[in-house]
Image (cartoon, rainbow, N blue to C red):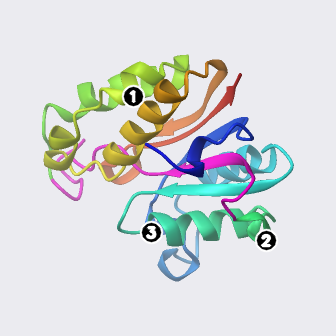
Amino acid sequence: MTGPVLAPSVTGVVVVPSAPLLLPEHAGQVDAVPELRAAIRETLSGLPVGEVALLPEPRWGERVGRFLLADAGLGDRVAVSAARALVVVGDGSARRTEKAPGYLDERAAGFDAAIEDALRSGDAGALAAVDVELGQELLAAGAGVLRALGAAVVESGRAVIAADLVHAADPFGVRYWVARWQLG
């Protein structure tokens, strides 16, 4: 991956879901995911001061990412030129249960667990190895962007010096993560 995504100025990475249910027009009168929303706000508010670049999954990612940044009071910081933080927007498998959007696929739990372990431990190499084709079969909207994140960190030669899996849940049979990495 080339370009400003992992410019030397980037010191923080945050992973958030691309779930449309986080957008006001798709939310019900009662928030279906209050813990997820709170984890996102708290994590985004802790981003380094400066501009923020988005690395969104193609379908909803940019729209959801921009909304989440605005919701956390950071909407005016989205830029790429001198970004201090990278916000990666994508989900895990949408085939975790029989009631999931893609119905149950037994491979989903293992696929998501590998990504979750990489996010928790700051293992960029493991993220760079995400099987995007399997991710497509499992309706994992974030497989490509998570792989791109891992590859960008590996290619940059920078280390993840701190990693924190802030939130992990699978409401409605879709795996969502909120994670943060600090880059050295």
Q: Would residue 177 be found to the left or right of residue 97 on screen?
A: right
Discs 3/1, front: 1
Dot 3 corresponds to which residue? 20
Q: Dot 2: within a 10 Å radius of its alpha carbon, few (fewer than 14), some, or many (20 or more) residues?
A: few
> What residue type is disc 3 on?
Pro
State the image quarter where residue 14 is shown: top right
Numbered circle sitting on residue 76: 2
Q: Quadrant of residue 108?
A: top left
The amino acid sitting under disc 1 is Leu
N-term-proximal mark, 3 vs 1: 3
Mark 3–mark 1 distance (CA, rounded to whole Å): 24 Å
Q: Is residue 127 magenta?
A: no
What separation in Å lies between label 3 and label 2 (alpha carbons)? 21 Å
* Quarter of the figure with the N terminus: top left
**Residue receiving disc 1:** 127
Q: What span is in magenta?
A: 79-102
